């Protein structure tokens, strides 16, 4: 979430300082000089630095704006990472802890994430209508046959849904029926490992 917010920070900084941090070129646009932005990993105050890239300011602003291409690439990568981590790391560990097969560890939201991942990696970010019908939790967030667009709010919502599903799994496995909060009310989870107190002498 911090990384996604960072793109908005880039956008705001360049938008405020576009005339100060850039250099005009010969071609003019609408009576104003075209502005370019220099990006470098080195200290810009030092001579002979290597520029990572030079790009038009409006292109830079567009890519780093909320909902822009940088944010979308990052958000989609997070979806791919989350499902892969679930499938390769968490799901087998849960199965081992419960003493059951991996196929018995099921999650509606992670099933939806699998469909999103497949669309991102294999269908140019489009969810086919037949796949969209299989979505159980996030069907209203991502229309079929439309490029997947994940806003900052959508990403936050996905994290909340994952935490709610984790709580549902815990309640089910522990036999909790009358919890103080329903799983739908949960927006965050903190798990604390209690330290064993030393045995006191009698």
Image (cartoon, rainbow, N blue to C red):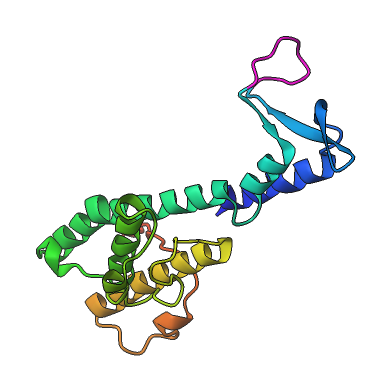
Q: Tell me which secondary structure the magenta stretch mostly adopts.
A: loop
Q: Is residue 111 left or right of residue 98?
A: right
Q: Residue furthest right?
A: 31
Q: Tell me how many marks there are.
A: 0
Q: Quadrant of the N terminus?
A: bottom right
Identify which residue, 17 or 83, lies in the foreground.
17
Quadrant location of residue 104?
Answer: bottom left
Q: Is residue 127 visible?
A: yes
Quadrant showing the C terminus: bottom left
**Is residue 45 on the magenta stretch?**
yes
Residue drawn 48% across and 48% down? 73
Q: Residue at x 63, y 24 (%)?
A: 41
**Magenta segment range?**
42-51
Q: Quadrant of residue 117?
A: bottom left
104 lies left or right of 1? left
Residue 192 position (above or below residue 36): below
Tell whether position 153 is magenta. no
* Relative horizontal placement of residue 52, taking residue 20 as reference (left or right): left
Farthest residue, direction top? 48
Rendered location of residue 95, percent (x, y): 16, 61
| Front residue of this view, candidates 155 and 25 | 25
């Amino acid at each position: 979430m911090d990384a996604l917010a960072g793109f908005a920070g880039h956008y705001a900084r360049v938008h405020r300082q576009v005339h100060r941090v850039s250099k005009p070129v010969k071609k003019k646009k609408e009576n104003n000089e075209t502005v370019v932005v220099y990006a470098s990993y080195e200290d810009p105050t030092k001579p002979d630095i290597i520029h990572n890239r030079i790009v038009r300011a409006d292109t830079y602003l567009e890519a780093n704006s909320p909902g822009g291409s940088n944010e979308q690439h990052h958000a989609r990568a997070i979806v791919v990472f989350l499902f892969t981590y679930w499938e390769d790391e968490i799901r087998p560990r849960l199965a081992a802890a419960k003493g059951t097969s991996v196929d018995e560890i099921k999650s509606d939201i992670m099933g939806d994430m699998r469909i999103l991942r497949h669309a991102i990696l294999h269908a140019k970010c489009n969810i086919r209508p037949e796949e969209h019908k299989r979505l159980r939790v996030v069907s209203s967030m991502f229309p079929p046959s439309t490029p997947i667009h994940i806003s900052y709010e959508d990403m936050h919502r996905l994290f909340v849904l994952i935490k709610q599903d984790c709580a549902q799994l815990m309640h089910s496995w522990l036999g909790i029926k009358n919890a103080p909060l329903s799983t739908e009310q949960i927006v965050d989870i903190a798990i604390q490992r209690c330290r064993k107190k030393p045995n006191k002498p009698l």
